[in-house]
Amino acid sequence: MQCMNERFLPCDSRRRLAIVCWICCAVTVGCAPAAHYAGDGRARSGGASDAIDEPPRPAPANAPSDAAPIASGTTAWTAPAATHQLAKQDVRPEPRDSRPPRQRALLIAELQGLEALARETPVTAPDHPELLRRLAEDYVELQRSAHADGAASIETSARTKAIQLYARLASDHPKYPKLDEVLFFLATEFEQAGDLANARKAYMSLTVRAPDSRYVPDAYLAFGEMFFDEAVTDPSKFDLAAGAYQEVLKYPPPRNRVYGYACYKLAWVLANEGDRANAIEAFNRAIEFAAEFPLISGAQKLGNAARADLASLQSRQSE
């Protein structure tokens, strides 16, 4: 498969340098050192008991949504919010098991036992990294359970503990065989918590410490999404978003499951920058991806969204 940016958007070394410099600046200046964002993970990982007695409460009525319209830049053309949300949810891969979480009582009981075991297990023990990983994953599952019940404070507490544990695992066991997964999950937890500075830091750490990881395209996609969202109020960020999406396209499918979604979002960037001819090419590339790899999660819905948006762009072009 021919690389998309070779077909309609030649790689610009200055653009690539700009995005790398921007990210490096963000993770150096805008983020706290690892020891700070990680927490020590020891003194503050007192177990699941902190969240046990918290009664479920509904999510706030004014909770923010990421389904806001996409900025139109100078073109006065905005993406349908529902289409953008559909593609973002269905195409960005779920990093974890998406099965329904276990009952909260079972999770809490397991967490209490694991926390007690962790306190007695030396850092040098062979099973210490897997114990931290299991604890972190259980807290993520508790998060999902609390979210489903509208228990916002439990969800927040569980996410905080998951972040501490992932960060501690990455710090205490830098040679852990699945370090790339740990860094990716740490980054996504920060992102979901709204801590974009530390999310950027963790994503960048993934690309540096595990450059051959299958999660590297997802990390660059995350940078693209952050830049894209920032372009709503600062259109100059569209160029950085384009650079990040192009980095995603260096990794071919099917191993890179977000290739088609990066094509789709790059099309939106180009449209917002007024480059409609290349935007059309990018939408077509997303459609080709969906047709060629129909078994990749969300491919059919991505193809449908790209076709609909392509038709909208072409109709406006003919006006």
Image (tube, helix red, strand yellow):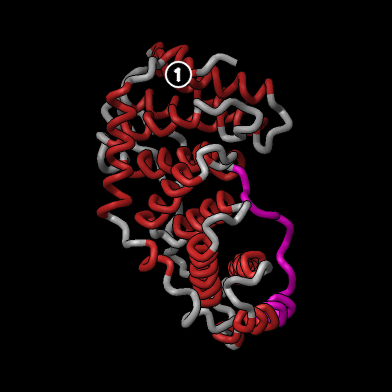
Residue at the spot 27% in from the left edge and 35% down from the top edge: 235
In the displayed structure, 192 sits above or below 204; it is: below
- Classify mark 1: helix, strand or loop: helix
Total numbered labels placed on residues in the image: 1
- Position of residue 231 in the picture relative to residue 284 (left or right): left
- Nearest to the observer: residue 286 or residue 65: 286
- Nearest to the observer: residue 204 or residue 236: 204
Q: Quadrant of residue 70?
A: top left
Q: Position of residue 262 (x, y in %)?
A: 50, 31
- Residue 205 shown in magenta: no
- Nearest to the observer: residue 7 or residue 216: 216
Instruction: Give the extent of the magenta segment.
Output: 93-111
- Amino acid at the residue labelled 1: Asn
- Position of residue 255 in the picture relative to residue 312 (left or right): right
Instruction: Let me know if residue 221 appears in the view.
Output: yes
Q: Where is residue 175 in the image (x, y as percent from the top left)?
A: 56, 55
- Position of residue 49 in the picture relative to residue 102 (left or right): left
Instruction: Say which residue label 1 marks.
Output: 5
- Nearest to the observer: residue 294 or residue 164: 164
Residue at the spot 65% in from the left edge and 84% down from the top edge: 116
Q: In which quarter of the image is residue 298?
A: top right
Instruction: Let me know if residue 314 appears in the view.
Output: no
Crowd rating for badge 1 (residues with CA inside 10 Å; few <14, some 14–19, many 20+)? some
Q: Where is residue 103 in the image (x, y as percent from the top left)?
A: 73, 74
- Residue 102 shown in magenta: yes
Q: Indicate the quadrant containing the N terminus: top left, top right, bottom left or bottom right.
A: top right
In the displayed structure, 81 sits above or below 255; it is: below
Residue at the spot 48% in from the left edge and 58% down from the top edge: 192
Q: Residue furthest front?
A: 124
